[in-house]
Amino acid sequence: MGQRLPLSTTGDARARVRSLLARPRWPGGQPRDRRGQHRQLVSRQLKTRGFTLIEILVVVTIIALVTGGALLALGLIGGQSGSSRDLERLQSLLLDARDRAELENRDYGVRLLADGYEFMAFDAGTGRWLPIADRVLGVARWSTPLELELDVEGRRVLLRREPERDLAPAPDFGVDASGEFTAFELRTVVGSPPRVWRLGPDDAGELQLRELQGREPAAAPRIGQ
């Protein structure tokens, strides 16, 4: 009779199964996590990609615009002196006064002083012009003494050389409740050789600040001394 093959015990079978399961199923001996490897690859690409050329150009453009605006506000570029910057500020405040006039349905005005100007508002209750005392529209001073000329509705206005104590002060020009500016022209002489800058409404009624080309500045009183 033939010899019978020895049967493996239960414990030996379990050991063989564990041995087979523990063997590496691919080179390297570690399971391949394709999703994990893909995420790691994408992460590395994002970290090493850096900025594109378009992104760099956008950042440079934003920096240039911000820097240029700051320099213009400080008057470091553009060739404008303190005199023309004072008129720029007055122009901006007049536009703000126009918005208030239309919103509040009352007239606003500007009264020139010896060393600056003040904003006023018409009080319908008392029928008088009253000074405005707030942080935006109020009393302002010229940054430097100015040579000024003022025409209102085609007529020259004598500017104040010394502070006055008017019992009923009135503005020299302004804007009414409908948003229409007085027909005025305020001029100042800037620089050497002298250049004349003009602030006032244009033919369409829009407030404009521009240089008067080819015009010789007339003798004007110096305001602010």
Image: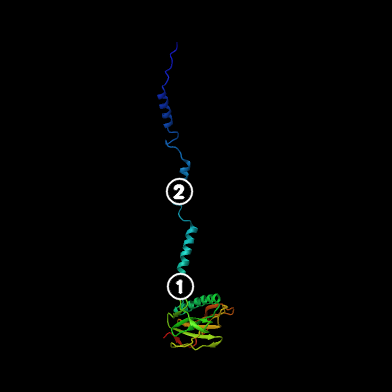
Whole-percent x and y of residue 6? 42, 18
Q: Quadrant of the C terminus?
A: bottom left
Q: Nearer the viewer, residue 168 or 115?
A: 168
Q: Residues within 10 Å of mark 2 (few under 14, many from 20)?
A: few
Task: Name the residue at 44% across, 71% down.
Answer: 71
Q: Nearer the viewer, residue 7 or 120?
A: 120
Name the residue beneath numbered marker 2.
43
Task: Name the residue at 46% across, 63% down.
Answer: 60
Whole-percent x and y of residue 28? 42, 36
- Measure how far apart labels 1 and 2 are at the Cα level: 44 Å
Q: Quadrant of residue 5?
A: top left
As drawn, 65 above or below 201: above
- Residue 223 lies left or right of residue 200; in this view the side is left
* Comes first in the chain, label 1 or label 2: 2
Instruction: Check disc 1 and give the amino acid type.
Output: Ala
Whole-percent x and y of residue 145? 43, 83
Name the residue beneath numbered marker 1.
73
Task: Name the residue at 47% across, 61% down.
Answer: 59
Does residue 216 appear in this view? no
As drawn, 186 above or below 70: below
Q: Residues within 10 Å of mark 1 (few under 14, many from 20)?
A: few
Q: Quadrant of residue 163?
A: bottom left
